[in-house]
Amino acid sequence: MKIREVVDALERFAPLPLQEGWDNAGLQVGLTEAEVSGALLCLDVTEKVVDEAISKQCNLIVSHHPLIFHPLKRIDGSSDVQRAVVKAIKNDVTVVSMHTNMDNARGGVNYKIAEKIGLCDMDFFTEMKTFNGVDGASGVMGKLPEPLTAEEFVARLKTVFGVDCAQCNSMLSRKIETVAICGGAGSFLLNDAIKAGADAFVTGEMHYHEYFAHEDEIQIAVIGHYQSEKFTQEIFKSIIMERCPQVRTLFSEANINPIIYI
C-alpha cells in the first residue's frame, strides 16, 4: 500500500477544508507514492520522533500538530523544526499532519476527549460546516451519565488525562451534567459554551483574564494542551486499521509533554 492511500484515508475522515484558515494541516514533508513501511503516530514531530521513525522502519509519520506551522525562509538546521525537516528528507520519511481538520471532524479530537470523559449524546455546539459529506465544527458538547459535583468532575479529569494540576475558576455550586469541550487552545469557545448552556467547559489552554466573571456561571477546567490531545493517536490508529489494515502502526514513545510540573 502506498503512503498516498493512507493519507487519503485520513483525509476522507477529516477533509482538509475543515481546518481553520490559519492552520497548515496536510502533507508537511516528503513524497507519497512510495510503499508505506509503517506509520508512526504522534502529537508533535520533533527530531527525536523522526529518529524514532527511522529506527522503527516507519517511512510515514502522522502527527496532530503540524511540523511546519510558520513558513520556513531558510533551512540551515538552526531549529528543531528545521533539523526534523532535513532528517526526514534525507531518510525518505514522509510527514503528514491532521490538525484542526481532525479537531473539527465528527468523531475527531473533541469527540475522543468527550469519549474519555464518559459523555453521551455528543454533538457540536457551534455552527457546523460540511465538506465531502463530512460534518465539522469547533467544539463538542455532551452529557455525563450521572451529574457530578465540580470537585468530582475535576478529579475525574485529572485521573483520565493524567493531569498533575488542573487550572479552574471557583468550584461551581450546582452539579455538572452538560460539558462543552475544545481540545488544545480552546478559550475562544468559552462564551459559546456558556450560550449553549454547558455546566462545564474543558480545554487545554486559557489566558489569565479569561477566568474572570464566570463564578457560578460555568465550571472552567483547563487540563493542559498536551494532556487534552494526547489520545489523538488513537483516532489515527483506528482510521488506519479500519481502512488500511495491512499497514503497521506504532504510537511514538519519543513524543512526550515538553512541560513538566514541579
Image (tube, rainbow, N blue to C red):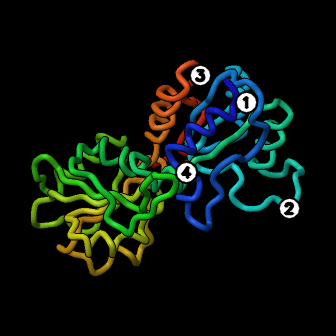
Badge 1 amino acid:
Asp
CA distance for labels 3 and 4? 21 Å
Q: Measure the C-alpha gap from mark 2 to mark 1.
A: 24 Å
Separation of marks 4 and 1 at Cα, in angstroms:
29 Å
**Image position of 136 with respect to 43: above or below:** below
Question: Nearest the camera: 200 or 244?
Answer: 244
Q: CA distance from mark 3 to mark 1?
A: 20 Å
- Residue contact at pointers 4 and 2, CB within 8 angstroms: no
| Marks 2/3: CA–CA distance | 35 Å
State the SS at label 1. helix
Are circles 4 and 1 on residues that touch, CB within 8 Å? no
Name the residue that disc number 2 marks.
Answer: 73
Kindly identify the amino acid type of the residue bearing the numbered disc 3: Val
**Dot 4: element:** loop
Image quadrant in which the N terminus is located: top right
Say whether disc 3 or disc 4 marks the residue closer to the N-terminus: 4
What element does badge 3 sit on?
A: loop
> Could you say whether the residue bearing mark 2 is in a helix, strand or loop?
loop
Q: Which mark is residue 247?
A: 3
Amino acid on which the number 2 mark rests in the picture: Lys
Give how far across and how far down residue 166 sits, in percent.
34, 55
- The x and y percentages for residue 188 are 43, 71
Q: Earlier in the sequence, mark 2 or mark 1?
A: 1
The residue to which callout 1 is attached is: 51
User: Residue 15's mark?
Assistant: 4
Q: Residue at x 21, y 75 (%)?
A: 215
In the rendered image of this protein, does residue 193 appear above or below residue 240? Answer: below
Q: Please state the horizontal and vertical placement of residue 120, each as a whole percent of the image.
A: 21, 47
**Image position of 2 (left or right of 87):** left
Q: Residues within 10 Å of mark 4 (few under 14, many from 20)?
A: many
Q: Is residue 34 left or right of residue 230?
A: right
